[in-house]
Image (cartoon, rainbow, N blue to C red):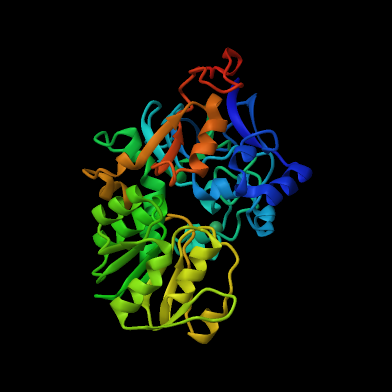
Amino acid sequence: MNTIALELYRSVPRYLAQRTVGRRLPGLLAGPISSLRLVHRPEPEAPAEGWARVRPVLSGICGSDLTTIAGEASFYFTALVSMPFVPGHEVVGELADDVDGLTAGERVVIDPVLACAARGIVPVCEPCARGEHGLCERVTGGHVSTGLQTGYCADTGGGWSGMLVAHRSQMHRVPPALDARTALMTEPLACAIHAVRRAAVPRDARVLVTGAGTVGLLTVAALRELTEAGPIIAVAKHAHQAALARRYGATEVVPPEEALGALRRATRAFRLHPERSAPFLLGGADVTFECAGSRSSLDLALRGTRARGRVVLDGMPPSADLTPAWYRELEVVGAYSGAGAFTDALGLLDGSDLGSLVSAVYPLSRWREAVDHALSAGRLGSVKIAFDPTDGEAGGSSNGTNAFRPTKE
Ligand SMILES: [Zn+2]
């Protein structure tokens, strides 16, 4: 059985071209130099007992997907993926097979980490044995090819397709009350919850959140739900982001160029102006979450945090000048994946309006528009962009012919 899928395939010249033009010309990224292509490919098959097919009904476009498509991801990841792979790790799907207590037709969300349990590795690695499968040390072995997550593994398929396979240990049943858009926020919210836990935010701490896209907004919401943080200063470039950051609990929202000034006033810090480089504070936030994934955002996080304060890397980080981490003795804390936080995320989503952060949904056939939209989401007044792989609509792109209509069965 074939399925329709967006596939990321290796292409060194294209990869290098992307690194050169990158996001400066987003139209090109989804255009002729893209390393994404829409293909018909065989449905992935369950590699072992405990695996089942899942038909994605909504799959988000994440900042890390865009970084990967843009060829801006660190070469570090090349050892953690297998090509070609179908991206898409934020997935709401419908089970196509019965599997261990779940019935075909039920809706599930996928915890994308491909850890020991999914890979059939026995005995499991030490982090998996502790229940911290997000830190699994065996993501290159077992029943499926190398791949840190669904959406980076050649064998499992991914959310940007008509069918993927997942292991029962990756599946969480979606409560009937949650609509698909709200359920789509489960994985990103689980990541935000995990980041907030990693930060161990003290009571009344003064918190800085740099970035107010999906990650930043969910981090603000998780901070208000799960901690007794004091004032939260959020950094937002666009008006709709600022309004949402306030709605989810930010005390003050400022554009990037005013962030250090706001922090200086809120924490009575001193601002210094080095040569040929951005200003920094002596004093500043107790805890900072870097949520934009840009160099300027990470610089701001490092330069706006007080001595011995904590900087949480909430997403795939760019490179940065680590001088403040040394001089101010910062704790730089990574927060990868939402592993272990899915049940809590589903609980928080129940009754929330976070599904409204899904701004636009595209059929796979219109992937170029979708990627362009996601690359410019902030500027266009949008937050989360997603695919509906069940939508066979021809759409407006040059690829939008009936040849790409997904087969439902
Ligand atoms: Zn493991």
Q: Quadrant of ligand 1?
A: bottom right
Residue 318 versus residue 283: which sits nearer the camera?
A: 283
Outermost top residue? 402
Please give the name of the residue rendered at 65% of the width and 58% of the height, measured from the top-left corner.
74
Please give the name of the residue rendered at 37% of the width and 46% of the height, measured from the top-left corner.
186
Please give the name of the residue rendered at 60% of the width and 20% of the height, measured from the top-left corner.
1
Q: Is residue 396 above or below residue 229?
A: above
Q: Quadrant of residue 184?
A: top left
Residue 368 location, x and y as percent? 57, 32
Residue 46 versus residue 264: which sits nearer the camera?
A: 264
Outermost right residue? 13
Residue 16 versus residue 402: which sits nearer the camera?
A: 16
Please give the name of the residue rendered at 54% of the width and 38% of the height, measured from the top-left corner.
372
**How many labels sit on residues?**
0
Q: Quadrant of residue 79?
A: bottom right
Residue 207 location, x and y as percent? 33, 70
Q: Is residue 180 above or below residue 120?
A: above
In this rendering, position of residue 287 left or right of residue 75: left
Question: From this viewpoint, is residue 70 visible?
Answer: yes
Residue 203 versus residue 383: which sits nearer the camera?
A: 383
Residue 163 location, x and y as percent? 53, 29
Question: From this viewpoint, is residue 159 visible?
Answer: no
Residue 101 location, x and y as percent? 37, 36
In this rendering, position of residue 209 left or right of residue 17: left
